[in-house]
Amino acid sequence: MTMETLDRALRGVAAYRPILHTPEIKALRQLLDGIMAKNGEKAVDAYAELFYQLRQDGYQGLGDWFYDQLRDQNFPYARLMERGENDPALEAAAEREIGLFRTLSQLDCGELLAEMKKTVPDTEMLPRWTAGCPFTFDSLTQFYRTHGSGLFARCKAFLWEDGELFPVEDPDCPGPEEMLGYELQRDQVIANTRAMLEGKAMNNVLLYGDSGTGKSATVKSLLSQPGFDQLRLIEVQKEGLADMPRLIRTLGGRRLKFILFIDDLAFDQDDTTYSVMKTILEGGLEKRPANVAIYATSNRRHLVRQTFSDRAGDEVDASETIQEKTSLAERFGLRIPYLALNQGEYLDLVERMAALYGVEMDKQQLRTGAIRWEMRHTGRTPRTAKQFIASLHLDKKE
């Protein structure tokens, strides 16, 4: 393509229109304009600006930059492919424009500099970016179908705060090899999640029990499970429950599957968000999308604090008050207890964890130390065992 043809093609970009407003493409268009107008100074300035913008964002060339833009932004064609729908006009426009972006990615800096040299000297002193293109129309289309678009294509974990989604670039997601103990409980969570990913019926999940048993880690580790590439995890703080219906509406119709994760969920007697949570789980007029599930952890089995006055107060139908308070937990179809380990299970866990973290110690000495540590700390849990193993590493350093 000639410079004039490239310029006209850029002006006609429609399916990926927002790309035209980026600093990189503005500089590229100025570069083409300068070359066509034989305005060497304008061309040199735009060339330098384009190089700076690419390096400023950590890119070696236009190909890598285009690739990230096309994957990470929420463009109409990406959403169309994610939903599995058809729009011939949009598909044709996207294919044509991706072809143009491939051509621009493969522009030889030497060719550009040669054109500029016709009007200004010493262009060979200018730096060069790398020419090349890591994507095709077919590869991008497949990416959209598998990973979605926008924020959800870039990250797997998010925080829902103040009515906005914030991507978590480096989430704390333990790998399967790090998850020791409570295999039966985790297997239930994994099986339920796999059913959702396969489009089958699944339940909302409540993991309840003692602190430090790995309830939260179980949920977060789902992102590390093999074959769970289409799973996204969104952590919602209790303060954000009122905004959850709005979030859920934005997730429907996508091919990706979403777990809305509420950690350490509990309510006091007059908590106004209690009724909101009941409606979200079950009972509202608006149907929850099939690709969204609620997973929560709590130290309380029934989620709501109960007092003796609930059972011995002056209310005529005290039993109804109790049933009302237990009904929220019952709306989770899968309720999985995480209870503290007995001593034998705890010591077995310590041995397995020692092997995982490369601790070499006499078995009996290890078990004796673990018992002493547990007596000074709360509960026989994976958290206690991990803290004990960490203390051994510290002792070694000292």
Image (cartoon, rainbow, N blue to C red):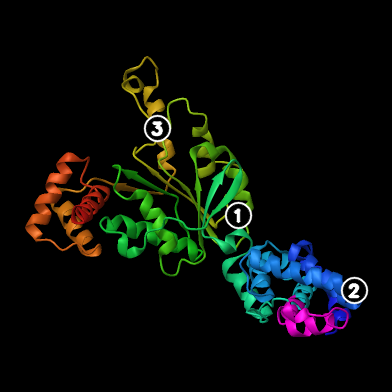
How would you rate the neighbour count of disc 1 (Cα within 10 Å): few for under 14, some for 14-19, many for 20 or more? Answer: some
Q: Position of residue 301 (x, y in %)?
A: 34, 39
Q: Main secondary structure of the magenta part?
A: helix
Q: Amino acid at mark 3?
A: Val
User: What range of the chain is rendered magenta?
Assistant: 98-125
Residue that mark 1 sits on: 251
Residue that mark 3 sits on: 304
Between the C-alphas of marks 3 and 2, the distance is: 73 Å
Between the C-alphas of marks 2 and 1, the distance is: 49 Å
Residue that mark 2 sits on: 39
The quadrant in which the N terminus is found is bottom right
Magenta segment includes 243: no
Depicted 71 relative to depicted 376: above or below? below
Depicted 90 relative to depicted 257: above or below? below
Q: Amino acid at mark 2?
A: Asn
In the image, 190 versus 286, the foreground residue is 190
Nearer the N terminus, badge 3 or badge 2?
2
User: Which of the two discs, 2 and 1, sits closer to the camera?
Assistant: 2
Q: Is residue 350 left or right of residue 168?
A: left
* Residue 215 seen: yes
Mark 1 element type: helix
* Residue 85 seen: no
Q: Is residue 281 left or right of residue 22?
A: left
Q: Position of residue 95 (x, y in %)?
A: 74, 77
Mark 3 element type: loop
Nearer the N terminus, badge 3 or badge 1?
1
Look at 57% across and 37% down and name the residue there.
242
Q: Amino acid at mark 1?
A: Leu
